[in-house]
Amino acid sequence: MTKIQNPKQFDLEDRTAEFAGNVRSFIKKLPKTLINFEDGKQVVRSSGSVGANYIEANESLSKKDFVLRIKICRKEAKETRYWLKLIEVYDKVMEQERQSLIQEAKELMMIFGSIVRKTE
């Protein structure tokens, strides 16, 4: 029997992958300063962890495991937002891109928070 999959589940997998990709593109364009290098490493890790943990949640073995993974997704999105706020940008275009990424991190946090509330 074929398992029926929730299309929204995969939309969020795609959205988190796109978010991580957009963060990476943003980091590549940053001024090459020591601070941006260090903060950039952190934001790349945390942004990728959002989607990776969401995939793990979708493969969870129990409701408790699912909730834990979703909480980790929310935590990683929050951490990504933090690192994005610390990165140094020097022009208006890069600042707009950063604000867009911060907004997406915030939206992901709210989505994962909603999933936790509905699941618990």
Image (spheres, grey):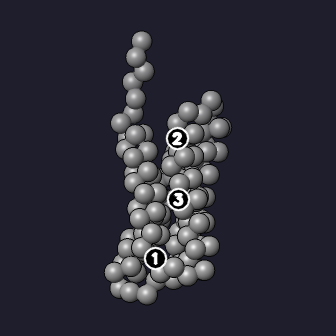
Instruction: Please report the residue visible at 34 percent of the width from the left and 81 percent of the height from the top.
Output: 93
Give the alpha-carbon distance from disc 2 to disc 1, as whole Å. Answer: 29 Å
Q: Amino acid at mark 3?
A: Ser
For residue 39, what is the image quadrant?
bottom right
Other-residue count near label 3 (Cα within 10 Å), few / some / many at <14 / 14–19 / ≥20: many
The total of numbered circles placed on residues is: 3
Marking on residue 91? none
Q: Which residue has dot 3 on it?
A: 47
Q: Which residue has dot 2 on it?
A: 55
Residue 82 appears at what percent x and percent y?
Answer: 57, 72
Report whether residue 117 is seen: no
Q: Is 116 displayed left or right of 23 in the figure?
A: right
Label whose residue precedes the other's in the sequence (2 or 3): 3
Label whose residue precedes the other's in the sequence (1 or 3): 1
In this view, the residue in front, 112 or 34, is 34
Give the alpha-carbon distance from disc 1 to disc 3, as whole Å. Answer: 16 Å
